[in-house]
Image (tube, helix red, strand yellow):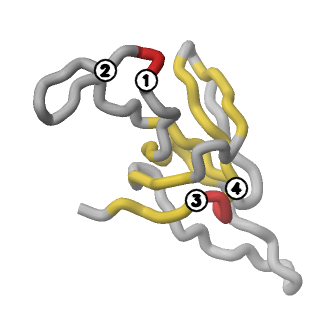
Amino acid sequence: MAVKPLEDRVLVKPIEAETKTASGIYLPEASKEKPVKGEVVATGPGKRLENGKRAEMSVRKGDTVVYGKYAGTEVEIKGTKHLILRETELLGVIEG
């Protein structure tokens, strides 16, 4: 099953937080925070402008992005959790 986002939506696969701290302490499942960064899996064609053309998306497949803790809608694709977000819900792109 393939999912193609519509309009200015982005399909993101969350990147899970580390289970171990820098000093080597393992974190219990209950203390982990919800992921706030992920990899863009697919993007829609862009928002339709008043003149009928589409705005170019500012993210591409493969980009690592940061988003709000409670942003988007969770969906499960082939047993893996993903998020569908509007491009405006993305806070930034991690470079490098």
* Crowd around label 3: few <14 · some 14–19 · many ≥20 (10 Å): some
Residue 94: which quarter of the image? bottom left
**Taking 58 as reference, is 70 left or right?**
right
Disc 4 element: strand
Residue contact between numbered discs 2 and 1, judged by CB atoms under 8 Å: yes
Q: Which residue is labeled 2 in the image? A: 27
Real-space Cα separation, disc 2 to disc 1, in angstroms? 7 Å
Residue 55, percent from left and from top: 69, 76
Q: Which residue is labeled 4 in the image? A: 86
Number of numbered discs overlaid on the protein picture: 4
| First of labels 4, 2 by sequence position | 2
Going by the numbered disc 1, the residue's amino acid type is Ser
Disc 3 element: strand
| First of labels 3, 2 by sequence position | 2
Disc 2 element: loop
Real-space Cα separation, disc 4 to disc 2, in angstroms? 31 Å
